[in-house]
Image (cartoon, rainbow, N blue to C red):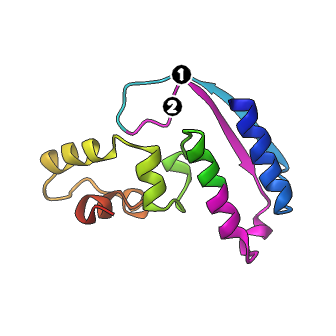
Amino acid sequence: KACEFIMKLLDLCRKYKLESWFLNVKRHTVDPYLLSFAEDGYSTTVEIPGRFTKWSRFSEFLDKMVSLAVDYNGKINLAKDALLKPSHIRAMYPKLPEFLEIKQKLDPNKLFESVLSRGLLLISYLHNGR
């Protein structure tokens, strides 16, 4: 499945004329943490020149790329992304409600929040269920 995903990812890049100048593949093993990025499988990193981020179809491309990852039970690393939609986060991190329930019990005054956690919609997910 990993090779199939990578080929579809490269096809998507070609379709949008956003050929990556760097593609990295790493092997991972699963760990027990609730919001872990690591699963038993592979991760890929796609580097696309920054000049394309202003391109009118870039958000469409990103949405299709993330949807492709979801279709293959993949994840986007929360620490390296700020563009995921709440639906993508829920699909990629099914243990998020459990994590946020524990956080609410241990931190009812929200002392342990960060710009990153707010930016990733984790806190609004807890409050709004979106």
Viewer-side residue, 70 vs 121: 70
Say which quadrant the C terminus sits in. Answer: bottom left
Instruction: For residue 18, say whether it is visible.
Output: no
Q: Are marks 1 and 2 in contact (CB under 8 Å)?
A: yes
* Dot 1 or dot 2, earlier in sequence: 1
| Residue at the (75%, 31%) spot, across then down | 3
| Residue at the (76%, 65%) spot, across then down | 50
The quadrant where residue 6 appears: top right
Say which quadrant the N terminus sits in. Answer: top right
Which amino acid is tagged 1?
Answer: Thr
Instruction: Decide whether residue 48 is among the magenta residues.
Output: yes
Mark 1, other Cα within 10 Å: few <14 / some 14–19 / many ≥20: few
Q: CA distance from mark 1 to mark 2?
A: 6 Å
Instruction: For residue 72, say whether it is visible.
Output: yes
Q: Is residue 65 above or below residue 5?
A: below
Which amino acid is tagged 2?
Answer: Ala
The quadrant where residue 25 appears: top right
| Residue at the (51%, 31%) spot, across then down | 38
Q: Which element carries disc 1, helix, strand or loop?
A: loop
Q: Is residue 51 left or right of residue 121?
A: right
Mark 2, other Cα within 10 Å: few <14 / some 14–19 / many ≥20: some
Q: Which residue is mark 2?
A: 38
Over which residues does the magenta segment extend? Answer: 35-64
| Residue at the (51%, 29%) spot, across then down | 39
Instruction: Decide whether residue 39 is among the magenta residues.
Output: yes
In x, y percent, where is residue 31? Answer: 43, 24
Q: Which residue is mark 1?
A: 29
Q: Which element carries disc 2, helix, strand or loop?
A: loop
Q: Is residue 31 above or below residue 10?
A: above
